[in-house]
């Protein structure tokens, strides 16, 4: 590729070609930085995507945890909640919405209500 300024144009053409052939394309884009609002991507190609899932790390109860959220969906219903993501060797589980937290996407959530009993975030 002659220069980075042509990357978005080349990706658009490639994705259009794949779409016309009925190919499902999954792009994975790593973000620079681990947590916090300073995270950024090296190039913005979000306008090319029909759907964008964001996987984030956040801290809660002294643990580093993962969250998943749908940031963009071009057609159909849109899931607006942020949910905890549980990854293990053989399974992937998506938990209940993290309704008692604010600031998860920044990587530093604050509790909005105390937890009573056992649940995925407190034991």
Image: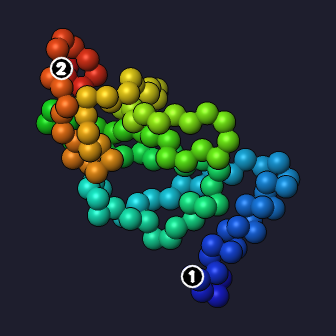
Residue 111 seen in this snapshot: yes
Query: Residue at image x 60%, y 44%?
Result: 73
Query: Residue at image x 25%, y 34%?
Result: 101
Secondary structure, mark 2, is: loop
Q: To which residue does mark 1 refer?
A: 4
Quarter of the image for residue 9 reads bottom right
In the depicted view, which residue is nearer to us: 77 or 35? 77
Q: To which residue does mark 2 refer?
A: 115
Task: Judge the density around disc 1: few (<14), some (14-19), many (≥20) Cα neighbours within 10 Å.
Answer: few
The furthest residue to the bottom:
2
- Left or right, 22 with respect to 69, comes to right
Q: Position of residue 28 (x, y in %)?
A: 54, 55
Task: Judge the density around disc 2: few (<14), some (14-19), many (≥20) Cα neighbours within 10 Å.
Answer: few
Q: Position of residue 66 (x, y in %)?
A: 34, 39
Q: Position of residue 47 (x, y in %)?
A: 61, 61
**Disc 2 to disc 1, C-alpha distance:** 48 Å
Instruction: Check the picture and name the quadrant holding the C terminus.
Output: top left
Residue 17: mark: none
Pick whichever of labels 2 and 1 is earlier in the sequence. 1
Instruction: Check the picture and name the quadrant holding the N terminus.
Output: bottom right
Number of dots carrying numbers:
2
- Contact? badges 2 and 1 (CB < 8 Å): no
Query: Residue at image x 18%, y 33%?
Result: 111
Q: Position of residue 37 (x, y in %)?
A: 29, 59
């Amino acid at each position: 590729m002659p220069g980075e300024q042509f990357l978005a144009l080349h990706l658009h053409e490639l994705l259009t070609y794949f779409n016309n052939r009925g190919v499902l394309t999954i792009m994975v884009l790593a973000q620079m930085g681990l947590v916090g609002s300073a995270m950024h991507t090296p190039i913005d190609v979000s306008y090319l995507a029909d759907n964008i899932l964001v996987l984030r790390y956040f801290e809660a109860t002294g643990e580093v945890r993962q969250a998943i959220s749908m940031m963009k969906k071009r057609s159909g219903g849109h899931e607006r909640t942020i949910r905890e993501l549980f990854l293990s060797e053989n399974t992937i589980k998506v938990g209940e919405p993290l309704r008692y937290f604010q600031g998860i996407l920044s990587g530093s959530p604050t509790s909005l209500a105390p937890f009573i009993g056992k649940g995925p975030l407190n034991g």
